[in-house]
Every structure is written in C-alpha cells, then in structure tokens.
Image: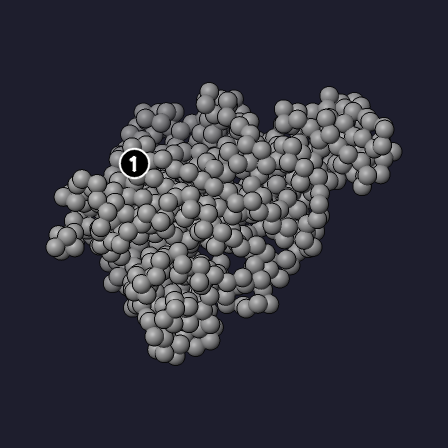
Amino acid sequence: MKFDTPAGPNPSDRGRVLGQPRDRIDGPLKVSGRAPYAYEYHAEAPGAAYGWILGASIGKGRIARIDRRAAEAAPGVLLVLTHENAPEQGEDSDYAAPQLQGPEILHYGQAVALVVAESLEEARAAAALIDIAYDAAPGHYDLAEERDQAKLPESGQTPPRTDVGDFETGYARAPVTLDVTYTTPDQSQAMMEPHASMALWEGDTLTLFTSHQIMHWAQEGVAATLRMPQEKLRVVSRYVGGGFGSKLEVYADAVLSALAARLLGRPVKVALSRPLIFNHTTHRAATIQRLRIGTEQDGRIVAIAHESWSGDQESGGTAEEASSQTRLLYAGENRMTRNRLATLDLPFAGSMRAPGEAVGLLALECAMDELAEKLGMDPIELRVRNDVGYAPEEGPAKPFSSRKLVESLRVGAERFGWEKRTAPGLRREGRWRIGLGVAAAVRPNLAQPSQARLRLDGQGQLTVETQMTDIGTGSYTILAQVAAEMLGLPLEAVTVRLGDTDFPKASGSGGSWGANSSGAGVYAAAAELRGMIARKAGFNADDAVFEDGGIRAGNRRIALADIAGAEGLVAEAGIEFGDLSEKYAQASFGAHFCEVAVDADTAEIRIRRMLSVAAAGRVLNPKTARSQCLGGMTMGIGAALMEEAVVDRRHGLFINHDLAEYQVPVHADIPHMDVIFLQEEDDKSSPIKAKGIGELGICGVGAAVANAVYNATGVRLRDYPLTLDKLLREMPAAAA
C-alpha cells in the first residue's frame, strides 16, 4: 500500500478497540518472568556455553603483547579468542562490526578478548588471567579543548548547516539581542537489560537471539560481519528490556557469540558487563551550544542562530544534531544553524532518546526564557508570538500537517496554574524557594516502510506476524488493537508475534516511528485480508462492515471463522510512504510545566509536580502513551539534575560506569506527574493518523526544570546537570 494522499475515513476511525486505554497483553508474561529475553532462550539453545568479554583498559594505542595461556588452562575454559586467533570478518562499515581484528585500540572498552567457559563464573575468572601489555598513545578526550578543531561533518541524518536570509545583518540590527552558551555532558542510556546475545549454528545457518531494536539492521550488520548470506541468518528479539537508541547497533556480544559458537560447535551466549555498556556501546555525546537570538521590542524574532559542537571517533563518527529542532520551532526570517563535529577518542557516540532534540532543547528553551526576561515578557507569550504555521526554513510553501504548540501551551498553563508564577526568587514556603518553569516540545514525525502478515484461522483467531520489536513501549498491544479494529474482532481474539526476521520486514523501534509505521503496516495487511474475506463471502469490500467477529452487508452476516474455514486465510502486505513528508512539515508538539522547591540553605532541588501536554496525532493507546510520556519526563528530570557520564581525561573512559555512580532518578525523585493528550488526527502522517510520541516526552523537560530553578532562585545555570554544588556557589549572591 502506497500512502501518498491524505487519509480519509477508514475502519481505524471507529475507536472501538484502537484508541482505547487497554492493558498490555504481554504484561502477565513479563511480571511472571515468562517473557524470554536474549540471554534466556534455554529451550531453543540448550547447553549453551558462557562468554565473557574483556575490554581494553586504555583509551588509545595498541596491544604490545597479549598472553592467553593462563586463561586457556583455567578450569572450565573452552576457548579464548584475541586478535591473534580470531577469524577474519567483514570490513568495518555502516553495517559490519568486526571484532578482534588487530592490535589497534580506538577507545577504552573496545573488545580485546573473549573467554568461553562452561559457566559464567569460570569465564569471568579466566578473563582476569589474560596478561596484556599496551603501548598507550595520547588521546583527545575533552570537547572544550577540541572545540576549535571541530568541523562540519560531510553527512548526517540532517544537513550539518542551514542558512536562511542574512543572520549576521539581522542580528546586528535587532533592537534586543541575546548571546548565551550552554553545555551538556555525555550521557548513557543505562537501560535495565544488558546487551546480550545467544548464538546457535545448525549447519551453515545461524540463529542469533539478541537484544536489538531493529531486526533487519541487526541481520544486515551481523551477516556483513560474518560474511554470510542474510538468508542464512535468523535474528530473534521478541522482548527487549529497554534500548533508548543504544540497541540500534551491533556490538561485540552478537559477533563474538556467533564466532565462538561456530568454532565450538555448540551454543554460546554473551552478555556485556555493566561497565562495558557504558564504555563499549554508544552514548549521547556532550555538547557545547551557542544561541544568538535577535528580536524586535515586541518579542518578534528577526534573527536566530544555534551552533552546536560535539565529539566522536574520527572514523564513522557522527555529530549530535542539537541545533536541528531550532529549524522547526520558531519564526524568524534570518536563520543559521550548525552542527560541528570534533574528533574525540572516547567510545562511539550514537543515538539516545530524542537524539538532537533532547539536548538541543535544554539550550534553546532556556534561551527563550532568558530572552523573555530581557524583554519583560511572559515566557509563554514570547513562544506564542513566535509560533509559525509552516517550516520556518522553507516558508509557507511547506505548511505543517498539524501543529498545536500554542494550544499545548495554553491548555497547560491553565491546568498547571501558570498565573501563580511570580518574579524570580519571590515565592517562598519556609526555607523552600518555589519556582515554575515551562518549555516547548517538538520532535519530527518520521515514518519507515513496514510490513506484516495476518493469519485468520477456522476458530476466528487472528495472528499478526511482523519483525517489529517491543522495547517496553507496548508494541504487542498496539498492533493487536490495530488488527482487532480493522477486522472487527475483540482484542482477546488477536495474537501478536514480533521480533523475528522470519516475519515480514518492519520498521523496528527507533526515532518514534515504531507504533505509527508498524501500525500502518498492520493496517495495510488487514486491508488486504478484509478484501480477501469480502471476496470469499461474496460481498463488496467497500460496503462490508466487520464487527463482532463477522462480516456484514445489508441483512446478511457471516462469521469470520466460517469464511476462514479449516485452511484459514493468510494476507501479507505493507506500507510505503510517499511524498507527503516533502509537501508538509510533520512533527509532534507539546509543552512541559514544572514546579520545583529549592532549599535556601543547601540548594537541594526537589521536583514538586510536572505536567506534559502532547499533540501527537491519534493516540493509539492512551495508557501506553501516557507511560511513554512519564518515562520521558523522568529521563528529562535526570538530564536536568543528575545524569553525567564523567570522563576520566587521563585514560579516556567514563569512570562512573555502573548504576551505583551514574545517577538516574529513582522513585523518591519523581513527584506527581500528569499528562494531557490534545485531540488530534494527522491524516497526512499515516492511514491510522498517528504521529510519534515516545521521544516527545523527553523533549524540553530538562529546560522546564531549569527554568523553574531559575524562577525559584534567580540563579541561571548554563552547565548541565544542575547539581547543587553549582547552584550553591551562586545562591548567596542571589540571596543578597
């Protein structure tokens, strides 16, 4: 099915199942421990040996000597792989991820050995016996020091630079100007389930049970690395215990488990230790961001520039595109954005929930508040005054498919009690200083081709099969709801099977495209099945009504089970997206509101309450969508107040590489939260009229927190996270 014209009325509009707040159908499996994760396919791969990966203990250089003899002689050890005896693999590329291919060390935590043994404990103990001598080389680990050497990358998900009008002239002529710089630290996705893989060879065919967000990317990457045909590789990832972008790549656990299993002729499973998750897998890169905004006296923006600097490895590195959302959010005829990339020898940077926007809005939305104060305007009114109905860089010829930013701000302000906001530092409750903050939210709406297969049996039961993954977002439930709505079935009559490359290719989970894209793929397959059923029943498909487990036209009704018969019916189809995204700017919008209390003596910050208002097309399941927003809000609080992967600039590693020292919010940190979904159906996004919401929940949250802290204390911090030591240094002066 080609989606190239706006969606009209269709069966997904009925709202009997789709759009209802249904419990997760996979919930009982997860809470009872019966949902198998990558390390737990014991029945499918019995007798698996255990692998343990040893990571490099220098940030840059080479292995001068490696002695594996003691490890090989240790109890239970079956195999020790290093660069000296590892099989040859495909060359490094966008897909391949070769391991142990030479003595060169590019970053701390790079795999330098794999030990396989009968037990995890034996493998881990033997790995400690490997004797390695390094020739360390000087490395570059400090973004601030390398900022002047940063360059515009040759490519990226979005252009590294944009220019509209004449920013420098417009800014120089503006009556009111703001020039501020914000910094954000490196961050880790820190998901609960570690990256893990279990490999099973049967002849020349490999089944890889792994933790990955996008099945066909994993299949392409591992097949390219092992130099094998993709059709000989089956990848299975039925349940993923969180990813946040970290599980978009192929790492050493997948490759080395497969190599070891082939060499040993038995299944091998490998999980990354928690320190390796921080230093071997990708992370969100630190940024330095400069915002310059020029306005008229009435607050209308006439010039805006957003420049960002981040760092990554020299080969294959990518910039954190922190200025990208500034191309979509506010008006201004003179514009300039830059995303520059410096070479750093830290572990590879990559996607983390809302890459670009999550940190870009930490700077932009605080700069808007600073500008509002300079203008003597309410921060919400400044944002409303600079709302625009079309893509700011492309003009009226490219309107937004839908844009409810102003409504999000207005509804949120009324519900949150924004009128109670005072001037900075004035509101107190005992020793607590109280402040309110706001920030706008935006996240581009992306869509990916997606396919599905639907099987209807003689019992009236429907099975959905697709490569789509569930990373804790509710994919099983939402896809069941789409299929049930389209076929007029109760949710209990639908079984969903996900995360297997034996199923039709799907979008996977990433970029907030998962539910909308894979849901549209199920819609397409369901439309195909509806046609098959109608033809077999002798009905006109356009006139037939599917409801209550049957098909009806006029006074005639036939049960779907009877039409399917003993042989059943199978339909397979998919969605391809046309040029609507070229004709219309597409994005989800929202607003975040935060109230904080700051201790006047200790500078302790407590979040008291938060509200998010979201406009993200049709909400497919309000219960799972709300959970996504709450999770994003929690991550936003973490980014504002505590999350920082601290770089040891002597050795080139993230030194707080565990869940004890890498601080994330816990239950006691999270107050009452509320979420409001605005009524919206985007007919230009997909046939099910939804848009992405999984990342919108984090976009702008940290800025709302920071703006609330400023409102409470009168102290503006521009270096995240806003830890109490930074705040405490400034508060005495502010109090005086």
Task: Label 1: state its secondary structure.
Answer: helix
Quarter location, residue 369: bottom left
Quadrant location of the C terminus?
bottom left
Nearest the eye: 373 or 305 = 373
Of residues 351 and 136, the one nearer the viewer is 351
Q: Position of residue 569 (x, y in %)?
A: 76, 31
Q: Position of residue 542 (x, y in %)?
A: 80, 41
State the image coordinates of residue 451 (x, y, percent, origin top left): 65, 42
User: Badge 1: how crowded within 10 Å, few (<14), some, or many (20+)?
Assistant: some
Does 330 sit left or right of 525 as displayed?
A: left
Q: Residue at x 42, y 68 (%)?
A: 300
User: Going by the image, does 196 lie left or right of 221?
Assistant: left
> Depth check: 568 or 595 in front?
595
Question: What is the residue that sits farthest to the right in this orientation?
Answer: 538
Is 591 placed above or below 494 here? Answer: below
Give amino acid for label 1.
Asp
Q: Which residue is the site of mark 1?
A: 669
Residue under the image location 16 percent in, 55 percent down: 734
